[in-house]
Image (cartoon, rainbow, N blue to C red):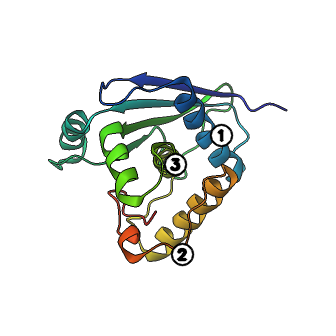
Amino acid sequence: MKRKLRVLTENDQDVKLIRWRHERLIRRAIAETLDLEGFDRPAEVSVVLTDSEAIREINREHRGIDSATDVLSFPQFAPGEKYPEEGYVPLGDIVISVERAENQALVYGHSFERELAFLTVHSTLHLLGYDHVTGEEDELVMREKQREVMSRLGLAVNEDRSADAEKDNDTGDKQ
């Protein structure tokens, strides 16, 4: 059975040319994350690709933090809240700074596509109720799930990288 998934992508930046393959990768990253979680309902996710200044404004407006970040997640449902019984489940919104993703890819020595997929997986887990800020155990669970999905996507991390490549990104997760 084919997964019913609507991914509504809006490209609101001109830092990097976003191609169809990037949008397909975002969709695959969301689908693999949902599969890992056993989420078998039809789902809808909104993804906005933006620049650092726009994500800074969104971060300031919604979180009271006046700085740019790499990704923001806006879940439609609180953890434990019931989803609608019928139709597509609107999981929420993902906002990715393409500018930050491109810079982080350079810092970590991997492709923009890998960084884009990672940020999408990370944010999708947040839409499903995961939160690495709530404690070390939750952070470890989230990291393991990210590793698994990235592996499924064929974008696994080389765990033998140098210490410089292990610095935390804005998501608070090691790449």
SS at badge 3:
helix
Residue picked out by circle 3: 114
In the image: residue 39, left or right of residue 146: right
* Comparing labels 2 and 1, the label whose residue is closer to the camera: 2
Nearest the viewer among 84 and 155 is 155
Q: In the rendered structure, which disc, 2 or 3, sits on the residue that comes first in sequence?
A: 3
Q: Amino acid at mark 2?
A: Asp
**What is the quadrant of the N terminus in the image?**
top right
* Comparing labels 1 and 3, the label whose residue is closer to the camera: 3
Q: Residue at x 59, y 62 (%)?
A: 147
Q: Amino acid at mark 3?
A: Arg
- Tell me the tag on residue 31: 1
In the image: residue 73, left or right of residue 52: right
Q: Residue at x 47, y 69 (%)?
A: 139
Q: Amino acid at mark 1?
A: Ala
| Residue 120 in the image, given as x and y percentages of width and height | 49, 44
Quarter of the rendering containing residue 163: bottom left
Q: In the rendered structure, which disc, 1 or 3, sits on the residue that comes first in sequence?
A: 1
Residue picked out by circle 2: 160
SS at badge 2:
loop
| Residue 72 in the image, given as x and y percentages of width and height | 36, 44
**Label 2 CA crowd tier, 10 Å (few <14, some 14–19, many 20+):** few
Q: In the rendered view, tell whether residue 24 sits above or below residue 153.
A: above
Q: In the rendered structure, which disc, 2 or 1, sits on the residue that comes first in sequence?
A: 1
In the image: residue 154, left or right of residue 166: right
Find the distance from the CA under tag 1 to the CA under tag 3.
16 Å
**Label 1 CA crowd tier, 10 Å (few <14, some 14–19, many 20+):** many
| Residue 152 in the image, given as x and y percentages of width and height | 69, 53
| Residue 48 in the image, given as x and y percentages of width and height | 40, 30
